[in-house]
Image: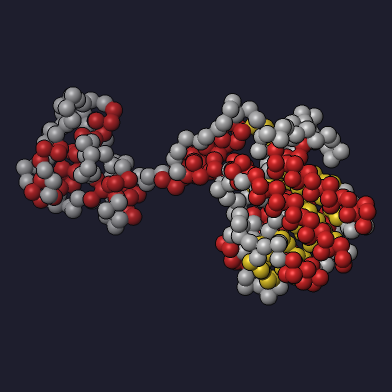
Amino acid sequence: MRYLITGGAGFIGSHLAERLLARGDRVVLLDNLSTGSMDNIRHLKASSQMEYHLDNIENLQLVAELVDDADIIVHLAAAVGVKLIVESPVRTIETNVNGTQRILEAACKKRKLVLTASTSEVYGKNTNVPFHEDADLVLGPTTKGRWSYAASKALDEFLALSYWKEKKLPVIVVRLFNTVGPRQTGRYGMVLPNFVKQALDNEPISVYGNGQQSRCFCDVRDTVEGLIRLMDTERSIGEVVNVGNTEEITIEGLAQLVKKTHRKLFLHRIRPLRSSLRARVRGHDAPRPMRRQTSRPNRFPPANFAERYHRPRHRFLPPKGRSRYPTRGGEQRRLNQLCRCRRVMSGGTPLPKHFFVSNRQDVFASDSSQSYAN
């Protein structure tokens, strides 16, 4: 089968192309890279079954040629993202409505199957969940720019179904629900990529309102599988089908999930090695753990310690406000560490570098990442 995918360099389009190529189909992509990216399809360029064209749907001659050569057209090209919709409502309406009209006109001449992507946004303010394909569409006032996207997509649905009813053009309308996954960008207001980026940058995760808004997020691989099955099913022609997930989560819950997942990965990546293990990694013979000191340790290192290891003598004094002879907790462990270092030195054994940190007051700590970075 030969597939033409408009918006093929986008998030969903690139995954669909990858899936179709994996099963041996021929794929042609058309994209102007307004919201797509070549990085999404770079790994597909080596395939002899794939070709791409960087152009607009407004190029009627090119669109007509590509439609003639295809068996099935998947129309994914659209203006997407809350940020883009609010900032450029004219572009949103023209891209969505005019682009769909040109694809339907070209496909109607050859009676080619067209799958056109709509959105769950068309349900608007409808509170009867779960949403059914025949449910009422409750949109907001035209003075609010955010509803231009939902209205334009609803008009796309009317146009596609009209071509089916009046001109018998086989069409399938799919309403996609919050598709997420690899290659999705947060540049246009997508919630999950923005949450992940803020977590990776160690920034507070921005949740608007009370965070109790609920959404159903669907993995892009499941979405792609749903699209392929619909195109392979003849009885889906002329129908409107919801494609999404049934598991609901609040935006606050999603933020907490991202934060929790990032914390686990972060701790797994930076969990410091034990001092004895670090010594072995650096090629030193690790000293055996010493018992807790029962006698009062000396406060200073040997007289020639600073000269031998190029460290100021005053750096080994206890921090101000602390007891000179701590008996428990972290300070006791640091002094025990110093005593161990003195014993190692007294025997003439080289001192591992990671025992001391030069840029902190608690110079006896052995669990700092700086201690073995140099």
Residue 111 falls in image quadrant: bottom right
The answer to whether residue 147 is visible is: yes
Horizontal arrangement in the rendering, residue 139 relative to residue 326 (left or right)? right
Residue 225 visible in the snapshot: no
Residue 62 pos. (x, y %):
73, 69
Q: Residue at (68%, 34%) from the top-left corner?
A: 143
Determine whether, in the image, residue 247 is placed left or right of residue 264: right
- Left or right for 153, reference 134: left
92 vs 333, left or right, is right
Above or below for 345 versus 59 = above
Q: Position of residue 314 (x, y in %)?
A: 11, 37
What residue is at 54 percent from the left and 40 percent from the top?
A: 195
Counting from the top left corner in percent of width and height, residue 120 is at 74, 41
Task: Choose between 238 and 46: the one closer to the eye.
Answer: 238
User: At 11% across and 43% down in the image, what residue appears?
Assistant: 312
Q: Is residue 109 above or below residue 150?
A: below
Of all residues shown, which one is farthest toward the bottom? 48
The coloring applied to the image is: secondary structure
Is residue 330 or residue 297 the one in the foreground? Answer: 330
- Numbered circles on residues, count: 0
Asked which quadrant contains residue 114, the reply is bottom right
- Between 133 and 268, which is closer to the camera in this rendering? 133
Which residue occupies 84% across, 40% down? 133
Which residue occupies the extreme left position in the image?
A: 303
- Image: 7 above or below 88: below
Q: Is residue 56 above or below residue 188?
A: below
Q: Quadrant of the N terminus?
A: bottom right
Q: Nearer the viewer, residue 344 or 207?
A: 207
> Could you say where residue 326 lies in the image, as x and y percent from the top left?
21, 26
